[in-house]
Image: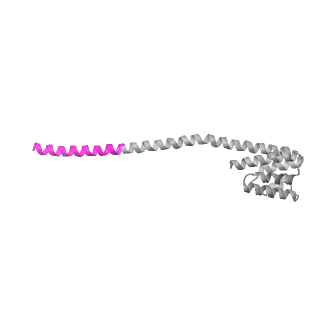
C-alpha cells in the first residue's frame, strides 16, 4: 500500500509539472504511465490517457477507476478543470496524497511499539502463570505426600499404643 500511495502522489505532482509546461494531457499521462511502479496502476494510467485522448475530461476518466482514485481526488480534479487551475489542483492532490501516506506510516510506526510491548508482556505473563501453576501442583503433591505420611504415622503410632 505504501508504494502505491507514493506512486499516486508522484503521479499527481509530476502531471501538474507537465501540464504547467503546457504539454498535452493525454501524452503526459501516457508518459507517466511508462515510469509508474506497479503494472496495475500503469495499466490504469494508460487507460486514463486513452480516455482523455478520446475527449473525456480527466475527472470522467478517473471515475472509471474508483479503486485507484478516491472520490475527493476526482472532485478536486473536476474543480480544477472547471476553474482552469488543473495544474495547481493536481499539485495539491499530490501534496495531500503524500501527507496521507506519511500519516499512515507514522500511525503504523506508533502502533507497532505498544503492540510489541503487549505481545512480549503477554508472553512473559503466560510463562509466569505456567511456572506458578507448576509450582502450585508441585506444592499440592508435596502436601498430599505429607498427609499420607502423617496418616500412616498416625496409624502406626496407634498400633504401637495398643
On whether residue 14 falls in the magenta region, the answer is: no
137 on left or right of 37: left
Q: Which quadrant holds the C terminus?
A: top left
Q: Residue at x 12, y 46 (%)?
A: 159
Left of 88 or right of it: where is 69? left
Measuring from the top left, give residue 26's x and y in whole percent. Answer: 86, 54
Viewer-side residue, 136 vs 95: 95
Which residue is depicted at the point 70% across and 48% down? 3
Residue 107 left/right relative to 159: right
Q: Main SS of the magenta segment?
A: helix
What kind of colouring is applied to the model shown?
one colour
Residue 17 visible in the snapshot: yes
- Front residue of 139/38: it is 38
Q: Residue at x 36, y 43 (%)?
A: 135
Q: Position of residue 74 (x, y in %)?
A: 80, 51
Q: Position of residue 152 (x, y in %)?
A: 19, 46
Q: Where does residue 64 sit, x and y in percent of width and height?
A: 79, 58
Amino acid at each position: 500500500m505504501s508504494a502505491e500511495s507514493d506512486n499516486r502522489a508522484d503521479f499527481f505532482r509530476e502531471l501538474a509539472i507537465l501540464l504547467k509546461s503546457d504539454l498535452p494531457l493525454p501524452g503526459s499521462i501516457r508518459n507517466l504511465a511508462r515510469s509508474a511502479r506497479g503494472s496495475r496502476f500503469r495499466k490504469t494510467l494508460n487507460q486514463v490517457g486513452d480516455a482523455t485522448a478520446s475527449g473525456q475530461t480527466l475527472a470522467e476518466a478517473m471515475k472509471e477507476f474508483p479503486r485507484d482514485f478516491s472520490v475527493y481526488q476526482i472532485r478536486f480534479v473536476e474543480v480544477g478543470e472547471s476553474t482552469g487551475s488543473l495544474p495547481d489542483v493536481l499539485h495539491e492532490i499530490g501534496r495531500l496524497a503524500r501527507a496521507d501516506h506519511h500519516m499512515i506510516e507514522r500511525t503504523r510506526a506508533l502502533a507497532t511499539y505498544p503492540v510489541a510491548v503487549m505481545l512480549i508482556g503477554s508472553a512473559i505473563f503466560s510463562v509466569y502463570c505456567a511456572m506458578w501453576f507448576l509450582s502450585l501442583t508441585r506444592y499440592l503433591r508435596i502436601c498430599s505426600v505429607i498427609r499420607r505420611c502423617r496418616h500412616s504415622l498416625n496409624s502406626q503410632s496407634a498400633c504401637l499404643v495398643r
